[in-house]
Amino acid sequence: MTADLKRLGKRGSYRLGRLRAQGIAAAGPPAPLRPAFTRPQHRGPTLAWLAAGLAGTLIIAAGAAAGLWFVPFIAGLAAGLANRLGGWRARIMMLAVTIMAAGGWAIPLGWFALDGNAAGATARVIAALLGLPAFATTGVLAALAVAAVQALAGLWLGRALTPFPGRG
């Protein structure tokens, strides 16, 4: 009995049959931790990606001014497809696409308000119809949120349609 107590916790003391004879190997050492800051960064010059983001913002703004409410989705889809070429992380692309879509819709909304149109009154009515507080800011933020959600859905689809480079 005392010999059994001395073996507790030591290698080989718990025999569970003939596992090694069946071809089950012992677990190897864990993989070394690879910190996030040592991973490879994106490909291509950052200035080119910023210019593409600005172009996307302007395309979304032109689409919003023309009444094409679905343009943020198409821009997000294009960004998701292009993301595989650039190798940006998902959280960076999500932030960039959200800023691109919200900025693209904010430009024509601000332009209409500065031009003397009743953008504030329209935003108040839209907010009230949505069941939100009847403030112009609430209506504008709701419109920007819808544009951002569309762009994020497009980004998700674009990333889902393009395969990872190393997974053939």
Image: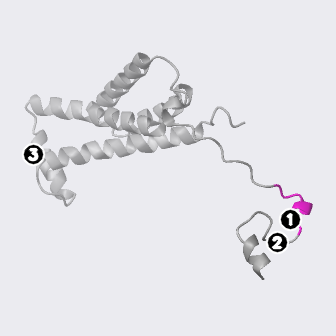
- Residue 102: horizontal and vertical position, in percent? 29, 37
Q: Assign a secondary structure to mark 2.
A: loop
Which label's residue is closer to the chain start, 3 or 1? Answer: 1
Tell me the amino acid under the disc marked 1: Leu
Q: Quadrant of residue 121?
A: top left
Q: CA distance from mark 2 to mark 1?
A: 7 Å
Q: CA distance from mark 2 to mark 3?
A: 76 Å
- Residue 141: horizontal and vertical position, in percent? 21, 45
Tell me the amino acid under the disc marked 2: Leu
Q: Quadrant of the image for the C terminus?
A: top right
- Residue 164: horizontal and vertical position, in percent? 62, 36
Q: Assign a secondary structure to mark 1.
A: loop
Front position in the image: 48 or 146 = 48
* In the image, residue 23 lies in the stretch drawn in magenta: yes
Q: Quadrant of residue 6?
A: bottom right
- Residue 76: horizontal and vertical position, in percent? 43, 36
| Label 1 Cα crowd, 10 Å radius (few <14 / some 14-19 / many 20+) | few
Q: Quadrant of residue 20?
A: bottom right
Disc number for residue 121? 3
Tell me the amino acid under the disc marked 3: Ala
* Residue sitting farthest toward the bottom: 1
Q: Which residues are magenta?
A: 18-25
Residue under label 2, please give it: 16
Of marks 2 and 3, the one in the foreground: 2
Disc number for residue 132? none
Q: Assign a secondary structure to mark 3.
A: helix
Vertical side of 23 occupied by 7: above or below: below
Left or right: where 55 falls relative to 29 = left
Of marks 3 and 1, the one in the foreground: 1
What residue do we see at 14% from left, 45% from top? 137
Q: Quadrant of the image for the N terminus?
A: bottom right
